[in-house]
Amino acid sequence: MNTVLQDGLGRTIDYLRLSVTDRCDFRCVYCMAEDMTFLPRQQVLSLEEIERLAALFVSQGVKKIRLTGGEPLVRRGIVELCAKISRLPGLRELVMTTNGSQLVRLAGPLAAAGVKRLNISLDCLDAEKFRAITRTGDLPQVLAGIEAARVAGFERIKLNVVVMQGRNADEVPGLVDYALARGLDISFIEEMPLGHVGRSRGETLCTSDQVRALISQRHQLLDSTESSGGPARYVRVAGFPQSRIGFISPHSHNFCANCNRLRMTAEGRLLLCLGQEHSIDLRGLLRRYPSTDQPLLDALHKALQHKPARHDFSANGDVQIVRFMNASGG
Ligand code: SAM
Ligand code: SF4
């Protein structure tokens, strides 16, 4: 299939992040407020609607789909959905971002359903701090989930760490050693100002350069020009050829010029940029036109002409985007 999706600035769009739910069993301090109201179920896309949208995007040139949330593994029917999406002709890979809490049960079935790679969030290796950051999470359960994923046969597993001064910056060296010992990739993310989470993010911002300095105290880092087509910049570690360390730096290094992605929220809003409010309602069109895709295609191509040049995040951590990360297809 040779169709290519391009936005108004000539960027090729071949990557869709699909949120399958806004719900989650964790309440991470950077992602959610303590008291969250989730979407009423009828506002969330059905599994059939998600599958229809995935097929439509793949028919237009999307080559990679990431299922995310909220926590994708709390959505009932997720494994069957994965099996259907992974078989779409033209799709190169189906991948997923998860908090790992359900992986002991689901890692094997997900791999069998065609999920190629997993990103697993892991912000620290201390059970008490882990509970404080996730508010409800159980570290041993997540670590057991990571081990289950390692034996399930995914092509790659990457750990995602949101680094905050005073919360988990001191965990960075230990997390790097944990990843290196298991041949996993690991990415460090600067916290983004999405949604009011009840604290000032500017005060805890830990930049990628600071994280890199922390790792350099223990390891020799080798610059790399590798790219996974996303916003991460990578380094390698001398003596550990299997692992890559990534830095996702929305504040300190703008990456928008190479943006190749779109996001679909759990309620079917197409987000053209994580750092802008503009979105279009595809759920309305899905439900109004159950048997013809043309109105959806017209809306998609029109919207792409308005994909913004760059995000609007500011480094002081002020919230310009009222959407929470769990509602954004993070
Ligand atoms: N629940 C899954 C998980 O935690 O991996 C998938 C959804 S979560 C929203 C996707 C990723 O976004 C996670 O790696 C999480 O750490 C990251 N994230 C959430 N809120 C963020 C924020 N405000 N800034 C930067 N990254 C954030
Ligand atoms: Fe849930 Fe993931 Fe958000 Fe944490 S980052 S609250 S695990 S959706």
Image: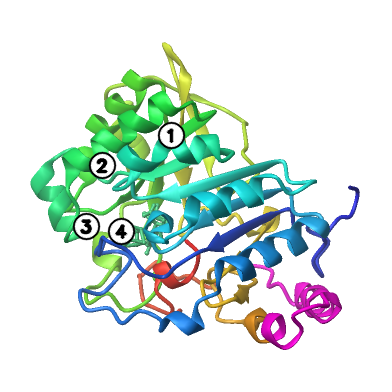
Q: Secondary structure at mark 3?
A: helix
Tell me if 58 is positioned left or right of 241 in this view: right
- Residue 307 is covered by the magenta coloring: yes
Residue underneath mark 4: 205
Sequence-first tag of 2 and 1: 1
Point out residue 111 in the picture as x, y percentages from the top left corner.
51, 35
Circle 1 crowding by C-alpha within 10 Å: few under 14, some 14–19, many from 20:
some
Residue underneath mark 2: 142
Amino acid type indicated by mark 1? Gly
Residue underneath mark 3: 134
Residue underneath mark 1: 108
Q: Residue at x 40, y 50 (%)?
A: 98
Q: Secondary structure at mark 4?
A: loop
Circle 4 crowding by C-alpha within 10 Å: few under 14, some 14–19, many from 20:
many
Distance Cα–Cα, label 2 vs label 4: 25 Å
Amino acid type indicated by mark 3? Thr
Say whether residue 172 is visible: no
With respect to residue 322, does 264 lie above or below? above
With respect to residue 259, does 308 lie above or below? below
Find the residue positioned furthest to the top.
239
Distance Cα–Cα, label 2 vs label 1: 15 Å
Q: Which residues are magenta?
A: 285-310
